[in-house]
Image (cartoon, helix red, strand yellow):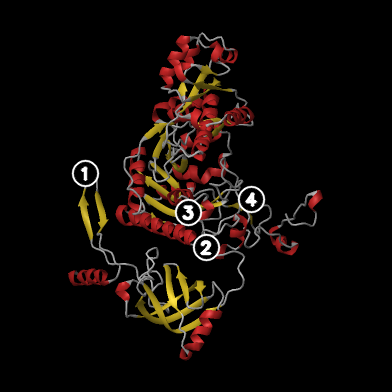
Amino acid sequence: MFTCWLGRLCRRLSTPTGRITHLIHGSHSRRLVLSSQRRIPELSSFVARTNTCGELRSSHIGQEVTLCGWIQYRRQNIFLVLRDFHGLVQVVIPQDESAASVKKILCEAPVESVVQVSGTVISRPPGQENPKMPTGEIEIQVKLAELLNTCKKLPFEIKDFVKKTEALRLQYRYLDLRSFQMQHNLRLRSRMVMKMREYLCNLHGFVDIETPTLFKRTPGGAKEFIVPSREPGKFYCLPQSPQQFKQLLMVGGLDRYFQVARCYRDEGSRPDRQPEFTQIDIEMSFVDQTGIRSLIEGLLQYSWPSDKDPVAVPFPSMTFAEAMASYGTDKPDTRFGMKIVDISDVFRNTEVGFLQDALSKPQGTVKAICISEGTKYLKRKDIESLRKFAADHFNQEVLPVFLKDNRNWNSPVAKSIMEEQRSELIRLMDTQEDCVVLLTAGEHRKACSVLGKLRLECADLLEARGLVLRDPALFSFLWVVDFPLFLPKEENPGELESAHHPFTAPHPSDIHLLYTEPKQVRSQHYDLVLNGSEIGGGSIRIHDAELQRYILATLLKEDVKLLSHLLQALDFGAPPHGGIALGLDRLICLVTGAPSIRDVIAFPKSFRGHDLMSSAPDSLPPEDLKPYHIQVSWPADSKGKEL
């Protein structure tokens, strides 16, 4: 037995990816860690080339190489630049008669044609080196060339600096993928996912499990895509997430589950949303919020790109109530200040009408934000635009207060503010002479929400004028906790809906309120925010069948039959469990600084959810629909047309 074990160990260590494992005893648990010894990937194994275009250096001079790639551009029929995924290299086109066939191929092939060249790595002549090019010290003296495929006239140039509409990029996505930026984004995404797998599976014993794509309708949440079946009147639904399956895996004793999961939501596309998206889905048994948060902090720290500043842990945390009060949103961007300040006490005896009216109501408050250097960077039209935004979107009045030398006030409300109110306001807001204060009054949450939006609008305006508030190289992580368990339904405020999903456990301190004041119950939900974007969310789950049934049937008034399988499973010894899902597309978008998640997905949908390359979704003839017992009911003005 020992001989067999030793043989297996030697074979493992002799493979290119062989690693030595060690057991490390930490303060809380034993961790399986990998040695840092790794081989450089073999980028030219199994293929026709000997090297990649971007790897050649002066140390390769004299070597015979074979390269494959696309013709980036050609200069005077003497040089051409060959490109592959790894970089660029200059190729010298032979000019002598004996190599006429090679010259013909390389001079006549259109740009973006695919060629294979063989030759010798030589140094560039003195003075012709290109320090901006990693391969700028060498070039290839070509001996053989083969045209592998020619390229027709392109709809746009494959260069990052060439401006292209997003619609054109999506229509010819296979060409857009050749760009340096798309190559960088997708390869970085691959590396981060691989590191996450390594951290979860190899270091912490998670099991990678695929869950079904064809499922059934789930109560609450976003709208789901419907898939017809051959049984009349019966349909599958594409899952919004593997939520129920991962809970059932905990009941099944899998203990630590992980999946790079495809998820689907039938909702309008936005810059940070897609109808189909990917999340890093995680669930654990016998865990609390602290354990989940520590796991995710370690996961991000481990998988973070090496060319960026290391991730500092632990991440700070903030309650939902604190986030709303200080930033007017549950996903605050903490890279800059401009916090919301409650100045209600300053105006208790005010003579300003709308302030008096607001403070006379039970939830009435006066709130403000201070825009540093506002008088220097903001124009009158900017202030009017901000006030119009607040009126149009929130039906909320916002008053600007301008400060000048010697505390002279130039504001519509200035005449009604007494000197002591001015001094107290300046103290509370910590204002300077070049500040602009935006002030509003009303119900607490509404006043905070409008100022939270204006805070971001002001940041956009100030940065457009050259003031840097949000450092793009800074990654500011934040946990937001203690969300409400329920919210009033928009269409019927007298009824409740889950703030996140109906499987979230209530806060232990608030369980008694479920039966008397459910609106006051906090949840064990937690969101991870990065630079003002939610990149993850999770919760400790309900593992008690009776509590789950009460919340579904009594409080949410949902049909428990839809979830009978889950309720039954919870009755068969379900362990306490919790989990989280990280939005992979959004995370990679922020890490790369891409303007949209469509720039970090290989084949995304358009803003309207269409695939412009293949023209999906598409219509089907009646004979293809017949087996599914479906007929299309065309709108009166669109009969016979494709929708």
Instruction: Look at 58% across and 30% down and name the residue there.
Output: 386
Read off the residue under disc 3.
Answer: 261
Mark 4 nearby-residue class (10 Å; few <14, some 14–19, many ≥20): few
Task: Tell me the mark number nearer the camera, choosing from 4 and 3.
Answer: 4
Position in image of residue 364 (x %, y %): 53, 17
Looking at numbered disc 4 in the image, what kind of residue is underneath it? Arg
Mark 3 → mark 2, Cα distance in angstroms: 33 Å
Read off the residue under disc 1.
Answer: 27
Mark 2 nearby-residue class (10 Å; few <14, some 14–19, many ≥20): some
Location of residue 540 (image quadrant): top left
**Front-most of residues 467 and 166:** 467
Read off the residue under disc 4.
Answer: 608
Location of residue 297 with respect to 344 vertically, above or below: below
Mark 1 → mark 3, Cα distance in angstroms: 32 Å
Residue at disc 1, secondary structure: loop
Q: Quadrant of the N terminus?
A: bottom left
Task: Tell me the mark number nearer the camera, choosing from 4 and 2.
Answer: 2
Question: In the image as oriented, which residue stretches furthest toward the left?
Answer: 2
Mark 1 → mark 2, Cα distance in angstroms: 52 Å
Position in image of residue 368 (x %, y %): 49, 23
